[in-house]
Amino acid sequence: MQFKHAPAAVSVSFDDPNLVSAAGLVPIMKLAEKAGLRRLADRWLSVPTDKGANAGQKVASLVGGMVAGADSIDDMALLRHGGMRNLFTKLYAPSTLGSFLRAFTFGHVRQLDAVASRFLAGLSEAAPVLGSGAGDGYVFVDIDDTIIEVHGHQKQGAGFGYSGVRGLNALLATAATTTSAPVILAQRSRRGGTGSPRGAARLVRDSLATLCRLTGTHGAAVLVRADSAFYGHATIDAATRAGAAVSVTARMDPAVKRAITAIPDDAWEAIEYTDAIYDEDTKRWISVAEVAEVPFTAFTSRKKAEHIAGRLVVRRIPELNQKDLAQPTLFDTHRFHAFFTTSTLATVAADKTHRGHAIIEQVNADLKNSALAHLPSGVFNANAAWLVLAVIAFNLTRAAATIAGAGLSKATTATIRRKLVTVPARIASSARRITLHLPDQWPWETAWTALFEHVGGSPPPIATT
């Protein structure tokens, strides 16, 4: 591609009041209205004084800005350009939205959590955010936390956590099926030095309660997956009491080591893993990785009523790091990875399913590549509210992409934004009707039109020539 004009023949002028750079906000914010975002915020938020007035409109503005790519309060100014006033009302200044966020207390953040939960339920009625449901399989609820890096010494709650990075801690719970991308069920913002399992039991209860509200999940089997940081009685008990199965990486404590030692040699089965080869003659995998299982009761150090029965599924691979060995060994030594599960999956399937927990890392990366690129305020509760709003924007974007189709239902937020949201348009009005003129030959015109018509937009006029 080469520029076709001489530099002197081109000039620019920012003077057109009828252009917008993010026409995709029209159908997406209609979808948000349909799912009840503004109504829910007006009902549940009670932020005091004039800063909390019109809470629904301010929440919708913040979410709309995040959908369009804003990752700071100042970026909310992108909602006030060109012809945006011809399309939307109540386009607040960034300073007004910043004052609104800084007025939040912890109680108001929890109110916003309630808005996010109910809004996701509304989205599930408007779009199949979890596909067609779990069918005969599980709905997977994944729990994990991540450190959002911050800079400056005036950020309330910032500290050095397990990663050695100075920041704030965000705890998330996602839901997904084998046919759908994840949506976020619940979230918590915590101090940077907080341990991973702190508050996880409450998050699990809230997540499973939200999941029950989603369309298509009634009666579905649920599997809660987590890494070893969440291998504790409180978290696992919260999941099992709610009727969910668990699949949680176990720490190598003495009880787990004894259980692994008791596995007989003929119980190990090769699995598909790195560098594995499938033998068509024997119908088996030729692999250095093997799995086996053994019955296991967790938390036997607690009173008997608090014991949780299940099984330990163990994956082993040869120890290749020989420099850690004092001397060569006569027999192969192995590294073991064990997880505790109460699911009904077969051994090999349980191992493969547990490894799917890594999908939540993609959600963490997606958020940090969009609205959570920064935590914009020095006030902890303002940043906690920002996290909840970022989750609302993530779920809204995912629902819009599911409706649009064209393979976007599992795309990242950045891809969805590029194809559906940041589409330039010129506004024309005639006979009290507004027409958006979008680029000719836009590659994702069909997907954009499908989303627009789904939320109640008028179909484009039929060409007569």
Image (cartoon, rainbow, N blue to C red):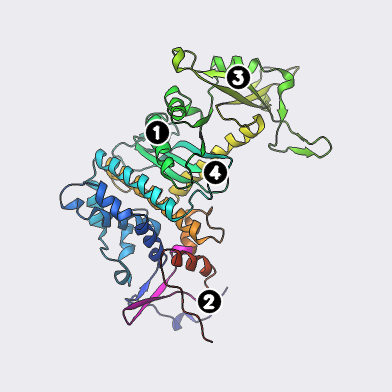
Report the mark closest to the observer, 4 or 2.
4
Mark 3 or 2, nearer chain start = 2
Residue 324 image point, x, y percent: 64, 22
Viewer-proximal residue among 134 and 276:
134
Magenta residues span: 420-441
Q: Indicate whether residue 439 is drawn in magenta.
A: yes
Q: Residue furthest right?
A: 281
Instruction: Residue 134: give its label.
Output: 4
Can see residue 445? yes
Distance, label 1 to label 2, CA atoms, is 57 Å
Element carrying mark 4: loop
Q: Which amino acid type is shown beneath numbered disc 4? A: Ala
Nearest-to-viewer mark from 4 and 1: 4
C-alpha separation, residue under disc 3 versus residue under disc 1: 26 Å
| Kind of residue sitting beneath label 1 | Arg
Q: Amino acid at mark 2?
A: Phe
Q: Which residue is mark 1?
A: 205
